[in-house]
């Protein structure tokens, strides 16, 4: 088995290229990819800042830097949570709502273009397969039982 034939290689390779593309497209609109993700992750009724990091897969220091940048640009505002005075909710400002619309359109249009180039059947198969993979990865014990350990036997598919 060639490294390029492994699932993890293809996911990592594809995501790296897609992330570069999104970064370039976001920069054309004067934002970073992390700002774009934040714009798409903040709910209309505001989102607790503690939930944004896990939702975006971002560490708290990076998230803090992103939110500070967004706040200084007038895209978000932070307000105390009305139900929990210790917590802060992040809200989009009118400028943030407009930037969110542009970001969403960019994502939708890129996905429409991928549908055009790959075809609906290929995209649907890819999405179904990735959905199954994500479900499996949510239950690592199904993938790797507690008593499992790699053997020293030659695997059926050898990486080269």
Image (cartoon, rainbow, N blue to C red):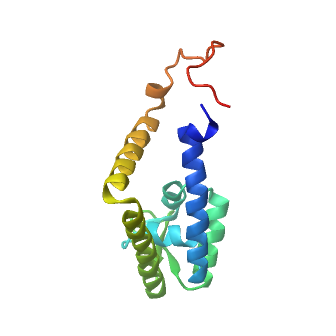
Task: Out of 133 and 82, give the one closest to the viewer.
Answer: 133
Question: Who's the residue at 52% across and 54% down the image?
Answer: 54
List x then y, in percent, for residue 47: 44, 66
List x then y, in percent, for residue 33: 58, 69
Q: Is residue 6 left or right of residue 159?
A: left
How many marks can you see?
0
Q: Is residue 37 left or right of residue 45?
A: right
List x then y, in percent, for residue 30: 60, 83
* Residue 66, visible in the rendered structure: yes
108 in relation to 14, above or below: below
14 in relation to 19, above or below: above
Question: Who's the residue at 67% across and 61% down the image?
Answer: 61
Task: Out of 146 and 6, give the one closest to the viewer.
Answer: 6
* Residue 80, visible in the rendered structure: no
List x then y, in percent, for residue 137: 46, 37
Q: Is residue 76 left or right of residue 2?
A: left
Q: Quadrant of the N terminus?
A: top right
Task: Out of 139 and 20, give the one closest to the viewer.
Answer: 20
Question: Who's the residue at 52% across and 82% down the image?
Answer: 75
11 in relation to 84, above or below: above
Question: Who's the residue at 68% across and 31% down the image?
Answer: 160
156 in relation to 60, above or below: above
């Amino acid at each position: 088995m060639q490294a390029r034939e492994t699932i993890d290689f293809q996911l990592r390779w594809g995501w790296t290229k897609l992330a570069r593309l999104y970064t370039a497209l976001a920069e054309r609109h004067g934002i970073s990819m992390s700002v774009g993700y934040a714009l798409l992750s903040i709910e209309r009724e505001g989102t607790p800042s503690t939930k944004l990091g896990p939702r975006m897969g971002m560490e708290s220091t990076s998230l803090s830097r992103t939110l500070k940048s967004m706040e200084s640009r007038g895209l978000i505002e932070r307000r105390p949570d009305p139900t929990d005075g210790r917590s802060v909710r992040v809200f989009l400002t009118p400028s943030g709502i407009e930037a969110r619309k542009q970001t969403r359109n960019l994502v939708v249009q890129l996905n429409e273009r991928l549908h055009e180039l790959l075809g609906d059947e290929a995209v649907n198969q890819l999405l179904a397969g990735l959905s199954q993979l994500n479900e499996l990865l949510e239950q690592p014990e199904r993938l790797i039982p507690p008593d499992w350990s790699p053997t020293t036997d030659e695997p059926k598919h050898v990486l080269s």
